[in-house]
Image (tube, helix red, strand yellow):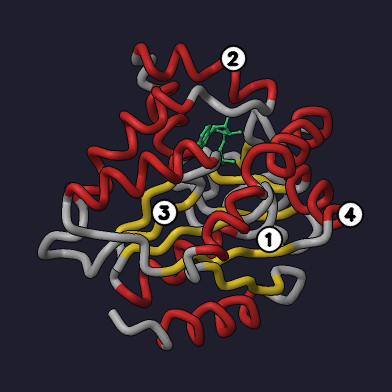
Amino acid sequence: MILVFLGPPGAGKGTQCKILADKYKLKHLSSGDMLRRERQEETELGQKAQEYMDSGQLVPDDLIVAMMSKEITGAGGDSSAGVILDGFPRTINQAQELDKALEAAGKNVDAVLNLEVDDGMLENRITGRRSCSVCGAAYHIMFNKPKKDGLCDKDGAELVQRSDDTAEVVRNRIRTYHEQTAPLISYYQEKGKNRTIDGNQAIDDVTDAMCKEIDGLSC
Ligand code: AMP
């Protein structure tokens, strides 16, 4: 099974992907996490991606497509029933390249889960996000507070903010989403793959709505 997650930054894609990957034993492939790892390891790709990520723009398609194609067509082996794509594709060109790579491997996108959230909610959701510098556990300064301010409940390590989660960069990321990624909704609607879900609801309700969609797929 190959699922694509669409939605603006702060819609809750990462949170839902982790829950669903666990429940359905799918491999969670997050292009943003992969790029952050490349940056941490100071690879050539990481260095090329840095400037785009820090300003809230998309990394050029050719770099992303090369990084993702290999992972996706190779995924879905013994340990997993398929993949959830989180943050990829993000342009029409990336979606077309994904379709080509999947077709060559005899696979296809089964469904697109499109999380819709009002723009007014996104900025607060994102600028309040914090994560553990050691284990990566996710928190929010208003909606999911740690027991002790600034420290992880699990291992006591310091909580940090993503460098692109600041207000100015967030506004650019939301604009970039509307200009370059939102057109993918029609792209997948035309193929009968799009399932829109109300992401303004509580986390558990969003998960339930997504599970209903996934359970209804014949794959
Ligand atoms: P995310 O963690 O998904 O919010 O991604 C963080 C940043 O990584 C984005 O703002 C982009 O700069 C870059 N990025 C992630 N995925 C893609 C993609 N599919 N295409 C282009 N840039 C991407």
Q: Position of residue 151 (x, y in %)?
A: 63, 47
State the separation of the CA atoms marked 4 and 2.
27 Å
Is the residue marked 2 within 8 Å of ligand 1, measured from its CB?
no
Q: Which residue is mark 2?
A: 51
Pointers 4 and 3 in contact (C-beta within 8 Å): no
Q: Which residue is mark 1?
A: 147
Left or right relative to 79: residue 172: right
Three-letter code, disc 1: Lys
Left or right relative to 189: residue 136: left
Q: Nearer the viewer, mark 1 or mark 4?
A: 4
Is 38 situated above or below 205? above
Q: Which residue is mark 4?
A: 120
Is 153 situated above or below 162? below
Left or right relative to 188: residue 54: right
State the separation of the CA atoms marked 2 and 3.
23 Å
Q: Secondary structure at mark 1?
A: loop
Q: Earlier in the sequence, mark 4 or mark 2?
A: 2
Is 125 situated above or below 47? below
Left or right relative to 169: residue 134: left
State the separation of the CA atoms marked 2 and 1.
35 Å
State the separation of the CA atoms marked 4 and 3.
25 Å
Q: Residues within 10 Å of mark 3 (few under 14, many from 20)?
A: many
Q: Which residue is mark 3?
A: 85
Three-letter code, disc 4: Gly
Three-letter code, disc 3: Leu
Q: Nearer the viewer, mark 2 or mark 1?
A: 2
Quadrant of the rendered image holding ligand 1: top right
Q: Secondary structure at mark 2?
A: helix
Q: Residues within 10 Å of mark 2 (few under 14, many from 20)?
A: few
